Image (cartoon, rainbow, N blue to C red):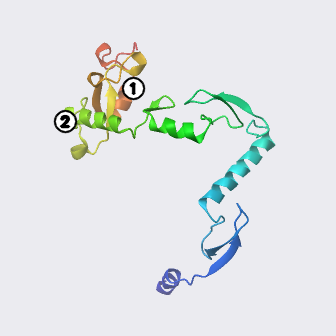
């Protein structure tokens, strides 16, 4: 057993020249490595090419010859694309949208003002869930920001409408107004 383990740990390695499945160029790999592509770009290109071929075989509208007209999510300019998921007319619009507070209707969580507000709310609420009293340092829970008056019922993102809650309490509360419902009430 020890000899076999020693062989596996000290297994001789040699290099092998193979052809990339994406671009067709020759590249060197280790004999025990299962690489098929010379780079991640080639790998993504090959997967994209195969998925388009599968879509064409199924008769999907991802076929490049079937163009659809869409409006850019940033500048609202019309553009043609074969992809239903494409939202921007150009890389320029895509990067400008990424720098904004709202991306596709959702707040950009990497926005520094959002992170500052989130931290200030945690600090205001003493880094504890305001529903059950748990904290990350003692109980290991994950804190979230919850809307007291849910956004689906007209709530805003003002600090007075936001409260610190743990993940479990936030998921359990969902969009329920706590003042209007008693626990166990089946009417809602």
Residue 174 marker? 1
Please tell me which residue is depicted at 31% across the width and 13% down the height of the picture. 180
Query: SS of the residue at dot 2?
Result: loop
Residue 125: tell me if it is visible.
no
Tell whether 39 sits left or right of 113: right
Quarter occupied by residue 154: top left
In the image, residue 10 above or below residue 63: below
Quarter occupied by residue 64: top right
Q: Position of residue 82 (x, y in %)?
A: 72, 37
Tell whether 13 sits left or right of 128: right
In which quadrant is the C terminus drawn? top left
Please tell me which residue is depicted at 33% across the width and 28% down the height of the picture. 146
User: Between 178 and 48, which is closer to the camera in this rendering?
Assistant: 48
In the image, residue 150 above or below residue 166: above
Q: What residue is pinned by disc 2?
A: 126
Q: For the residues labelled 1 and 2, say whether their Cβ atoms are less than 8 Å apart.
A: no
Foreground disc of the pair 1, 2:
2
């Amino acid at each position: 057993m020890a000899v076999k383990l020693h062989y596996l740990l000290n297994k001789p390695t040699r290099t092998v020249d193979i052809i990339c499945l994406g671009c067709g160029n020759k590249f060197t790999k280790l004999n025990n490595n299962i690489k098929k592509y010379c780079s991640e770009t080639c790998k993504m290109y090959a997967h994209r090419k195969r998925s388009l071929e599968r879509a064409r075989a199924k008769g999907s509208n991802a076929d490049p010859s079937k163009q659809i007209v869409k409006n850019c999510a940033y500048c609202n300019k019309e553009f043609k694309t074969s992809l239903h998921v494409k939202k921007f007319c150009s890389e320029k619009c895509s990067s400008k949208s990424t720098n904004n507070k709202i991306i596709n209707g959702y707040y950009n969580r990497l926005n520094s003002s959002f992170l500052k507000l989130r931290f200030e709310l945690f600090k205001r609420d003493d880094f504890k869930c305001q529903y059950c009293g748990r904290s990350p340092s003692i109980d290991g829970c994950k804190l979230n920001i919850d809307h007291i008056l849910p956004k689906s019922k007209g709530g805003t993102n003002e600090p007075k409408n936001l409260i610190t809650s743990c993940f479990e309490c936030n998921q359990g509360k969902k969009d329920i107004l706590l003042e209007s419902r008693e626990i166990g009430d089946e009417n809602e």
